[in-house]
Amino acid sequence: MDRSRTKVTVPKIVASKDEGRPLVMLTAYDATFARLADSADVDILLVGDSLGMVVQGHNDTLPVTLDEMIYHTRCVSRVTQHAQVILDLPFMSYQESPSQAVAAAGRAIKEGRAHGVKLEGGVSMAESIERIVAAGIPVMGHVGLMPQSVHAIGGFKVQGRDDAARARIMEDARAVERAGAFCLVLEGIPSSLAAEITAAVRIPTIGIGAGVACDGQVLVMHDLLGLDDGFKPRFVKRYAELAAPIRSAFQAYADDVRARAFPTEAQSFGASPLASKKPRAPREADGASDGYGPSDGDDGA
Ligand code: KIV
């Protein structure tokens, strides 16, 4: 992996469309996975309100609060060196008024240390997008299947299957572009419609369940990693099947504890002083080494 690559910026994301360079976006909710995704050359880390489902265990994204989004975004932005970090504004943190939207986006930047925000909605959100952009905050739009409208649309269903709905989504996409968004998520729409929108707007489109013609793709990290073996929607490609090996590791640990096979001498401490410790790795350098740091060597018994 190339650690010398430079920071992904909004102008670079916008330019990627003309350069024909597909954008890679992935959700992230914590420092450990953000570090991994950032070092894997992902362009954009979206702290998605999908965390309501994959982290908090809800059936939809609606209960997530702005404070929770800010907390998770801080965890991600603190360790991200290259990717753009985008905070997904949660339900009812921006729908009331453009002023509310600007205030929420401001908190995303100041407190979450995000580089920009995403919000759902097209024509109806154009004024809010304009106001946020005018405040100097990059906005990523999101049209098509909008999970925060799950009750209005009657479930997580593909949108834009008839002509009227296609026209509405196209109009939403154009409104988001006109309002000044720097890129646009297209979720849960037919590939043909995503291709039309991608050709019609000058900002990059990032698809999820929207086919291959989009200018980039996004997946929820937990789906890509196969962390929920009961969840296999058609639009997800699993690049790993981690649920089973993780469960096996937990089971092996439980078996060891019950059999008193863990810890062994190798994982135990003697009574000798701590002075002989080698220096800690930079990440743990803020406190005295006591053999608990992940890169500390044998404590000696
Ligand atoms: O919340 C989320 O993770 C999202 C992506 C699926 C686009 O909005």
Image: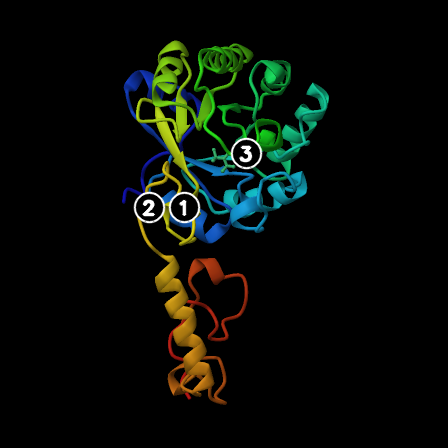
Residue with the mark numbered 3: 155
Amino acid beneath label 2: Arg
Residue 295 appears in the rendering: no
Q: Which of marks 1 and 2 is nearer the N terminus?
A: 1
Name the image quarter holding residue 92.
top right
The residue depicted at 45 percent of the width and 53 percent of the height is: 32
Cα separation, mark 2 vs mark 3, equals: 23 Å
Residue with the mark numbered 1: 223
In percent of width and height, residue 284 lies at 48, 62
Element under disc 2: loop
Amino acid beneath label 1: Asp
Q: Are marks 1 and 2 in contact (CB under 8 Å)?
A: yes
The foreground one among 206 and 154 is 154
Residue with the mark numbered 2: 238
Q: Residues within 10 Å of mark 3 (few under 14, many from 20)?
A: few
The residue depicted at 47 percent of the width and 24 percent of the height is: 159
Q: Residues within 10 Å of mark 1 (few under 14, many from 20)?
A: many
Cα separation, mark 3 vs mark 1, equals: 19 Å
Name the image quarter holding residue 118.
top right
Amino acid beneath label 3: Gly
Q: Nearer the viewer, mark 3 or mark 1?
A: 3
Q: How many labels, in total?
A: 3
Q: Which of marks 3 and 1 is nearer the N terminus?
A: 3
The foreground one among 251 and 86 is 251
* Above or below, 254 relative to 112: below
* Residue 28 shown left or right of residue 224 in the figure: right
Q: Which of marks 2 and 3 is nearer the N terminus?
A: 3
Mark 3 beta carbon near ligand 1 (under 8 Å): no
* Residue 240 shown left or right of residue 25 in the figure: left
* Residue 55 shown left or right of residue 135 in the figure: left
